[in-house]
Amino acid sequence: MNKRISVCGKGGSGKSTVVALLAQELSVRDWRVIVVDSDESNACIHWMLGFEHPPRPLLELVGGKKSVQKQMRKTYSDGDNSDMAVLSRPAVAVDDLPADYRVESDGRVLMTVGKIHQALEGCACPMGVLSREFLKKLQLAEDEMLLVDMEAGIEHFGRGVETSIDAVIAVVEPSLESLVLAEKVQKLASQAGANFAGVITNKVRSADVASTLNAELRSRDLLTIGSINYDEKLLAASLTGHPTHLAGDEVPNIVDTLLLPHDRAR
């Protein structure tokens, strides 16, 4: 069973919406859903999940960005290319974290790694390092499921974030750029040792578009595990900052597939 799932996609692909919809469905099924916001530019996932405010970023828990950068420099100057231990404990459960570093309601828990807040503050590499180390140390209880909202693009694969992930999902919208990115995600997930669970198509407006998109996915040997059609209600929720909900059987069917053993899911 896939219990540690990352959701990838290009900027604007609606991956955070997909994360929120999956979290909603899993919580209905009595999972405690741990959502880790690993996208340093996304500002709205807490609204989508129904929280009034985000938690304090985990970056503050380890002394801030400068502290992580200092540790990174020491690692490289010492000639040690092993994974850097950012958190002091060998293993961390969600409830081990101070209360203000997580928000929880209705079986959903949100944690955020860190955000870019100021111009000229430097690259987001410390957030990527922290994401990788935190996910390596995070221990899940039997009733917990992890969803990671990855940063847009594929840079997180270069940082090794997916080395602690069971399954990778690519959110694909009807565009060539999105298709090409999904191909790269499938390849990089395999190299990272993670199961590529498949593609979720998103923002599909018509049967003709769906047919063309699915044909392109098949030609690239990309497995489709579900589709989320274009929905005015989802658009309105995203525009006004309301929780994300979706009627119908699209998301339940996707979750059914994700909960299958790896060999049966394909």
Image (cartoon, rainbow, N blue to C red):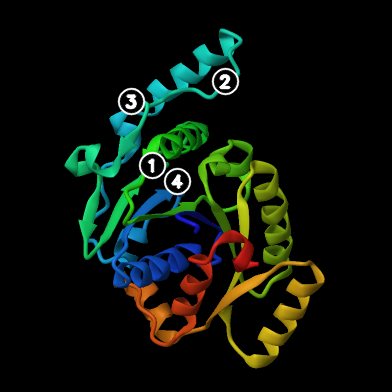
- For the residue pair 68 and 85, the one nearer the viewer reads as 85
Percent coordinates x, y for residue 210 in the rendering: 66, 85
Mark 4 highlights which residue?
40
Q: Residue at x 60, y 67 (%)?
A: 265
- For the residue pair 207 and 22, the one nearer the viewer reads as 22
**What secondary structure is marked by label 1?**
loop
Along the polypeptide, which appears first: circle 1 or circle 4?
Answer: 4
Mark 3 highlights which residue?
89
Q: CA distance from mark 1 to mark 4?
A: 8 Å
Task: Classify 10 Å Cα crowding around label 3: few (below 14), some (14-19), many (20 and above).
Answer: few
- Which quarter of the rendered picture does the C terminus lie within? bottom right
The answer to whether residue 103 is above or below residue 97 is: below
Task: Classify 10 Å Cα crowding around label 1: few (below 14), some (14-19), many (20 and above).
Answer: many
- Residue 71's tag is none
Label 1 with label 4: CB-CB less than 8 Å: yes
- For the residue pair 45 and 147, the one nearer the viewer reads as 147
**What secondary structure is marked by label 2?**
loop
Q: CA distance from mark 3 to mark 4?
A: 24 Å
**What secondary structure is marked by label 4?**
loop
Task: Classify 10 Å Cα crowding around label 2: few (below 14), some (14-19), many (20 and above).
Answer: few
